[in-house]
Image: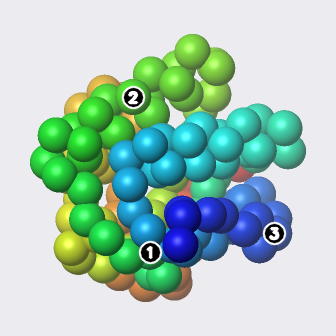
């Protein structure tokens, strides 16, 4: 099954998204850009992506590229986003997030939705 997202809703300035399916670089890049576009459209700057239902694993090279390309896309679109991801290894191991952080993106990986919500709530809307 291809990777897909569902926008679950918007609550207290946070866009909630669930993702499921098979993790590939192309699909992840496409969907992350789509999520950023939705946030821009809805005028929100905090996003929580629940990826607990994603399976598969990216290569280190693909993780690096994902972590490098998303901050660039966000910068090009003049967005100021905070991205929280809920996931588990090996699908999400935090490497792409660290690469993105090194490029100025405010992002973290969490093992539970509550931890991710608590982190996002520390940021002003």
Q: Is residue 65 left or right of residue 107?
A: left
**Number of residues whose C-alpha sits closer than 10 Å to that of mark 1, classed few (under 14), some (14–19) or many (20 or more):** many
> Quick check: can you spot residue 122?
no
Frontmost of labels 2 and 1 is 1
Which of marks 3 and 1 precedes in the sequence? 3
Residue 9: assigned label: 3
User: Of circles 1 and 3, which is in front?
Assistant: 1
Horizontal side of 86 relative to 63 (left or right) equals right
Distance from the alpha carbon under mark 1 to that under mark 3: 19 Å
- The percent position of residue 36, horizontal first and vertical second, equals 65, 40
Between residue 74 and residue 54, name the one nearer to us.
Answer: 54
Circle 2 residue: 69
The residue singled out by tag 1 in the image is 54
Residue 88: x %, y % from top left: 30, 78
Q: Residue at x 54, y 64 (%)?
A: 2
99 vs 17, left or right, is: left
| Identity of the residue drawn at 76% across and 44% down | 38
Element under label 1?
strand
Q: Which mark is residue 1?
A: none
The answer to the question of whether label 2 and label 1 lie on touching residues, with beta carbons closer than 8 A, is no
Secondary element at tag 3: strand
Q: Residue furthest left?
A: 60
Q: CA distance from mark 2 to mark 1?
A: 20 Å
> SS class of the residue under badge 2?
helix
For marks 3 and 2, give the one nearer the viewer: 2
Farthest right residue in view: 42
Residue at position x 48%, y 82% from top? 53
Residue at left offset 65%, top offset 64%: 5
Label 2 or label 1, whichever comes before in sequence order: 1
């Amino acid at each position: 099954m291809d990777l897909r997202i569902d926008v679950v809703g918007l609550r207290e300035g946070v866009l909630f998204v669930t993702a499921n399916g098979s993790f590939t670089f192309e699909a992840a890049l496409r969907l992350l850009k789509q999520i950023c576009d939705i946030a821009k459209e809805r005028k929100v700057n905090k996003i929580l992506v629940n990826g607990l239902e994603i399976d598969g694993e990216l290569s280190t090279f693909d993780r690096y590229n994902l972590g490098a390309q998303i901050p660039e896309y966000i910068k090009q679109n003049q967005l100021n986003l905070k991205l929280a991801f809920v996931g588990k290894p090996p699908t999400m191991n935090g490497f792409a997030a660290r690469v993105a952080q090194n490029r100025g993106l405010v992002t973290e990986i969490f093992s539970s939705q509550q931890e991710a919500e608590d982190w996002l709530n520390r940021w002003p809307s």
